[in-house]
Amino acid sequence: MKKVITLLVLSTIIFISGCGFLEETQDTINYATETTEYLNEMSIFAEEVQKVLGEGNVNVAELENTLTDLEGTVEEFNTIEVPAIAEGIHNDILAKNDQLLDIVNQVQENGEIAIEEIENSQFYQTIESFTNLMDQVEQLGFE
């Protein structure tokens, strides 16, 4: 009888610990997926801004909308749940997000976009640095 109870308790413990492992793995996969999508969005934003600025006659309203969307996307990503295994990479991304938001705020003057400020800022370099972080996310093993 003791053996049956011991076996039952051990089975329960193994099952419960396995569930925790599976849950953490699923959380990591979800985080990697969300982060990959986010980093891809950052790349698309960079292309959009570069396209808008490269057209010569800049549509300020379109550029303002793009930057507003960018701010919203960054702020939304900053609130996602992070598994313990990804805290380091997430902190790196948060630092880049802060840097990017600072740049966006610097190029806005009294609600107006200072186009030359974007062209002269570290905007593109900051967004390009997100691609380096993509490699680290992929190293989580869950592309």
Image (spheres, grey):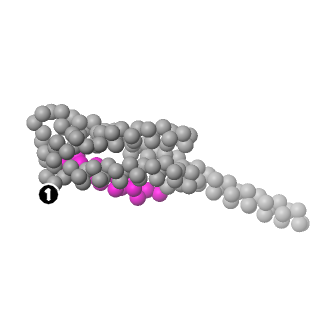
Name the residue at the front extreme: 120
Position of 90 with respect to 115 (left or right) is right
Between 64 and 122, the one nearer to me in the picture: 122
Figure quadrant of residue 47: top left
Which stretch is magenta?
Answer: 64-81
Q: Is residue 90 left or right of residue 58?
A: right
Tell me where residue 113 appears, x and y as whole percent.
16, 49
**Residue closest to the eye, 76 or 91:** 91
Q: Is residue 130 above or below residue 10?
A: above
Quadrant of the drawing holding the N terminus: bottom right
**Residue 103, position as x, y percentages in the image:** 27, 49
Residue found at x 13% / y 52%: 112
Q: Is residue 124 magenta?
A: no
Residue 27 visible in the current orientation: no
Left or right, 6 with reference to 83: right
| Residue corresponding to mark 1 | 110
Judged left or right of residue 20, residue 88 is left
At horizontal 45% and vertical 41% (from top left) the residue drawn is 133
Mark 1 closeness class: few <14, some 14–19, many ≥20 residues within 10 Å = few
Q: Position of residue 54 (x, y in %)?
A: 18, 33
Q: Amino acid at mark 1?
A: Asn
Residue 18 can be seen in this image: yes
